[in-house]
Image (cartoon, helix red, strand yellow):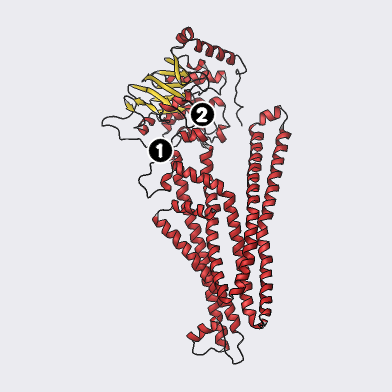
Amino acid sequence: MLIVRVLRTLWALLEPRRRWVFGSLVGLMFVAGLLEMTGMVVLFGYTRGLVPDGHGARHGPVARVLRELLSSVSQFDYVLWGGALVVLVLLAKNLLSILVHFLLNRFLMKLNERVSRRLFEGYLLARYEVFTQRGAAAPQHNISRIFELFSACFGATAQVLSDGAILLMVGILLIVVDPWLTVSGVAIFGVMGVGLYWATQGLLGRMGQQEAASKSLASRNLTDGFQGLIDGRLNNTRELFVARYVSALAQHSLNRRRKLLITRLPQSMNEVLLGLVIVLAVLLTTLRGKSLVDALPTLAIFAFAGLRLTGAMSRVNKGLQTIRGKIGEFDYFDAAVKQVAPQLLYARRADVPTDQYLSDEEPLPAGVDGRLHDRLELQDVTFAYPGATKPAISELSLQIPRGSFVSFCGPSGGGKTTLVLLLMGFLKPQSGDVTCDGLSVFRHVRAWHAGIGYVGQRMYLSQGSVRENVAFGVPSREVDDAKVWQALELAAAAGFVRELPSGLDTELKEAGANLSGGQRQRLVIARALYKEPEILFFDEATAALDNVTEREITSAIARLSGTKTIICVAHRLSSIRQSDVIHLIEGGRVKASGKYDELIAESPEFQMLAQSNESEEQGPRSGNSSPPPVA
């Protein structure tokens, strides 16, 4: 059952203290339901006592309470003090209801904050394989959707529990007032309500899937239209993107309208059934030979209770529909928590392992700083991605001396990027080890990372100032402008930064759209240099640049040779000609090693790669492949 699945996950997320709080809130819901029932009894009991019988006696629960409190109950006393009692009970009922909903929402929001934080931390600490499988978009989506999922699933579950408490308590009241009429009403509501629920759930599920698919298609066409703006204009296909977007949007709107129509059916049907039950009550009263005047308080209670019940039943139905519509995404979120933040679910079990990239970390030996002083070494390393049929790196061994300029090249898919990720300690091999001066980098990974600078294929720049991008992740008050300028100088970026309108304070637009491709890449290199690392990794850092800009970036990298250990992955061989040694990687193995001229003379595979590079460089790469800067 959906409610049970959601409650099971909620219960697993709570430590003992929060379980006690949640249990108390559920208890308060039932107290609120009890007050709901008391409010109806008092309200209609008060109206019943306004008309005394032939002997002047007043009947009803309010009259009995007042007789206990007052020696005599005159009409004035009854109207005054009985009215005050009614108002007091209704006030208490509504105040408690408001308090319970406030406390419940506060509880869920606090839980959302806790889970969001731990899930974010869990992803940031997760092994890098998590991101190679799904990319960075899936974790961002999971975290950004947590609040909506909490509101939809946990909130709807809480609403079902709250309204369920009202249904239970009001049902008890109605059984006490008139068992036969209550059973008849429950039978009518139950058969029709359950029948409608099961009839609509399958349809709503399919509509939910269609709605999600059409929404995704509309979003995709928006993305294609804007991201492919240049190609769209060149090919005059803008009308195609607009037509596809409008078609997907129309399908989304149609599914949405149909869902809204169906979700309205239970409420409308409940109102019709309520009228039917009231007519049935009048009919049964007549058939029993009772006076309708005497039966009016009972009928009034049933009418008022029916309105409350129909409202509660509609909210329960809506809550169940909400949970059913979100349960697939909720299960995906549950799986994500179990994968990257299992301590959220098993905080009370010390035997649950936490598989994070810091799980194997140990303190450094005395007198060791974890930095590279002699050599970096791969020892018979084999690594395969989860679900892969063959290893990306297979039994690979090599040494990289401190201060050397080492490059990797080879065909796409040969394992170059995987090799770099292994050297940086982001991927852990299934066999073999990566060592720095004889110490495993995985045992002292944070000390190892402290000495590494990285420039990847994707030039990520945040929407902040030049200073914030160079000193990325450093608190503003701790940024050293002297180090920022030093890094910019080494990256050959200081010149154009000085010409920017506000220098280091210049705000960069999304992804650095107001800079050229070469300028963006220089800033990324400056970022890698800011913390003064001993080792610089360049993973196809010039692959997206034109030939002129590539030569400028390559020169900037070459100037660092000798002062830094440089490890470079390159598709275009012109960027690694000055390497001390080039390793040709193919099929996860080293096929050949040597200087550029040695490989050209001795390696047929390298010769073929060089010829392919020459063909590419003679192609349409002489201009800047990046769009011009946006003013």
Q: Which residue is mark 1?
A: 356
Identity of the residue furthest to the left in this view: 366
Q: Which residue is mark 2?
A: 497
Measure how far apart labels 1 and 2 are at the Cα level. 39 Å
**Residue plotted at (41% across, 21% down):** 396
Query: Percent x, y for residue 612?
Result: 56, 14
In the image, residue 487 sits, relative to residue 103, either above or below, namely: above
Q: Callout 2, which amino acid?
A: Val
Q: Callout 1, which amino acid?
A: Gln
Mark 1 or 2, closer to the camera: 1
Left or right relative to 560: residue 6: right
Left or right relative to 329: residue 559: left
**Residue plotted at (54% across, 81% down):** 61
Residue sitting nearer the eye, 287 or 197: 287
Label 1: state its secondary structure: loop
Label 2: state its secondary structure: helix
Does residue 90 appear anywhere in the picture?
A: no
**Residue plotted at (54% across, 67% down):** 168
Disc 1 packing (10 Å; few <14; some 14–19; many ≥20): some
- For the N terminus, the quadrant is bottom right
- Label count reads 2
In the image, residue 586 sits, relative to residue 232, either above or below, namely: above
- For the C terminus, the quadrant is top right
Query: Percent x, y for residue 56?
Result: 59, 91
Q: Earlier in the sequence, mark 1 or mark 2?
A: 1
Left or right relative to 526: residue 247: right
Query: Percent x, y for residue 401?
Result: 36, 19
